[in-house]
């Protein structure tokens, strides 16, 4: 039997593979410290778990509308209005099985063969794979430490061609923690004025922001940006609900919403009903105190990790403004991130993700979504590895 050709162009997730390898080695009795997964180590807040239990007891265990129940969609609308001053209605929202599913739906319904999607690099591993699978062409704009891994309006302008369908922004970014400011987003919006180019803005880490800085939603910077932006978000990272699978889009473009409902209706239908009810208190702000506790702890861990990494000769990292990752520069040592990470895991039992997986050699991603003791122990092992090699 021959597998479809389109699968040949799809690469497996490196982050998932390294996480799985770390677990396998741990199961074999190795002392493995993993900093590879993009998953908070905190438990889901009690108020959300209680909402799920209440939903089960109330019999909310049946099919729902494909795009989600009205109460949950209204909670999304209220959240976007409260947090960013954005006005949406029920026709503008679709709930999917995590933001990854939302993105897959979008690429499937938007891209014809050869359509281009501009993606700043480094990027989350899934972005280019989904674009290619959908028949599109990922067009990368390289960044580096000097710009805190953010593209400029000038770079965007130079990358646009007649085939450009969308630009994909991720703020705060996985893997770098980069956060676009209002000024930067406004400049990007100015470049796009007069075009039909969409902005797909992945804002999954919006609640994990450091140093008292504000977060700016891409759709909020101008009326033009509002009209062209599809916001992608969810509850996995900020509310420690990775396994619940809750993602959503918000866009005033009704044709996108209708197409997504049609597509999702033939693939998964609705997301599970219990998660939809559990999401309501999270969206309404009832878990905000829990979210802030997690954010404060992430900031504390970031500060410790950045200081410790930058004290290791040959390594350096930009202090991230959000999310829970360090994107660590190893160019003084090697430009082969895969070999570096393989040897680090083999010799010192530390699992991290090579920069190559994110489209940028000479770096690796270190997740600080784990306890402080493990972070300090892990970085001590990284220091030992670097000095030894």
Image (tube, helix red, strand yellow):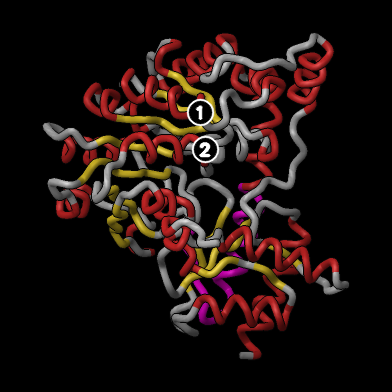
Query: Residue drawn 21% across and 45% down?
Result: 164
**CB contact under 8 Å: marks 1 and 2:** no
- SS state under label 2: helix
Against 296, is 291 above or below? above
- Give the label on residue 303, or none: none
Against 40, is 12 above or below? below
Circle 2 is placed at which residue position? 101
* Whole-percent x, y for residue 378 in the image: 71, 69
Query: Residue drawn 43% across and 54% down?
Result: 129
Circle 1 is placed at which residue position? 266
Mark 2, Cα crowd under 10 Å, few <14 / some 14-19 / many 20+, is: some
* Whole-percent x, y for residue 212 in the image: 51, 38
Q: Is residue 247 left or right of residue 214?
A: right
The one of 262 and 353 positioned closer to us in this rendering: 262
Report the quarter where the C terminus lies.
bottom right
The one of 225 and 342 positioned closer to us in this rendering: 342
- SS state under label 1: loop
Q: Nearer the viewer, mark 1 or mark 2?
A: 1
Q: CA distance from mark 1 to mark 2?
A: 14 Å
Q: Which residues are the magenta region?
A: 299-320
Q: Is residue 303 left or right of residue 162?
A: right
Mark 1, Cα crowd under 10 Å, few <14 / some 14-19 / many 20+, is: few
Q: Earlier in the sequence, mark 1 or mark 2?
A: 2
* Whole-percent x, y for residue 33 in the image: 75, 66
Query: Residue drawn 55% across and 61% down?
Result: 1
């Amino acid at each position: 039997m021959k597998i479809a050709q389109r699968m040949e162009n799809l690469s497996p997730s490196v982050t998932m593979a390294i996480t799985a390898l770390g677990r396998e080695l741990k199961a074999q009795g190795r002392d493995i410290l993993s900093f590879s997964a993009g998953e908070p180590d905190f438990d889901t807040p009690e108020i959300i778990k209680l909402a799920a239990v209440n939903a089960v007891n109330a019999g909310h265990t049946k099919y729902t509308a494909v795009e989600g129940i009205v109460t949950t969609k209204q909670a999304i609308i209220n959240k976007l209005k409260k947090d960013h001053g954005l006005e949406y209605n029920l026709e503008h929202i679709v709930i999917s099985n995590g933001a990854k599913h939302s993105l897959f739906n979008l690429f499937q319904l938007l891209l014809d063969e050869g359509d281009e999607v501009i993606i700043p690099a480094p990027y989350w591993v899934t972005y280019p794979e989904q674009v290619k699978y959908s028949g599109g062409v990922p067009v990368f704009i390289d960044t580096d430490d000097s710009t805190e891994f953010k593209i400029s309006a000038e770079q965007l302008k130079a990358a646009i061609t007649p085939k450009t369908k969308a630009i994909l922004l991720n703020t705060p970014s996985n893997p770098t923690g980069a956060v676009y400011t209002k000024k930067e987003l406004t400049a990007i919006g100015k470049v796009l004025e007069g075009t039909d180019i969409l902005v797909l803005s992945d804002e999954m880490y919006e609640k994990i922001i450091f140093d008292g800085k504000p977060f700016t939603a891409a759709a909020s910077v101008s009326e033009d940006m509002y009209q062209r932006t599809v916001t992608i978000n969810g509850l996995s990272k900020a509310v420690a609900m990775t396994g619940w699978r809750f993602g959503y889009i918000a866009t005033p473009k009704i044709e996108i919403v209708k197409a997504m409902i049609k597509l999702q209706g033939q693939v998964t239908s609705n997301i599970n009903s219990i998660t939809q009810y559990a999401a309501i208190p999270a969206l309404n702000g009832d878990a905000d105190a829990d979210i802030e506790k997690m954010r404060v702890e992430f900031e504390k861990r970031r500060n410790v990790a950045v200081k410790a990494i930058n004290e290791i000769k040959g390594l350096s990292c930009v202090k991230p403004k959000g999310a829970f990752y360090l994107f660590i520069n190893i160019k003084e040592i090697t430009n082969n991130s895969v070999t570096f990470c393989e040897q680090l895991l083999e010799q010192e039992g530390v699992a991290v993700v090579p920069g190559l997986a994110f489209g940028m050699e000479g770096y690796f991603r270190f997740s600080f979504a784990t306890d402080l003791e493990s972070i300090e122990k892990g970085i001590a092992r990284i220091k030992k590895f670097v000095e030894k090699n």
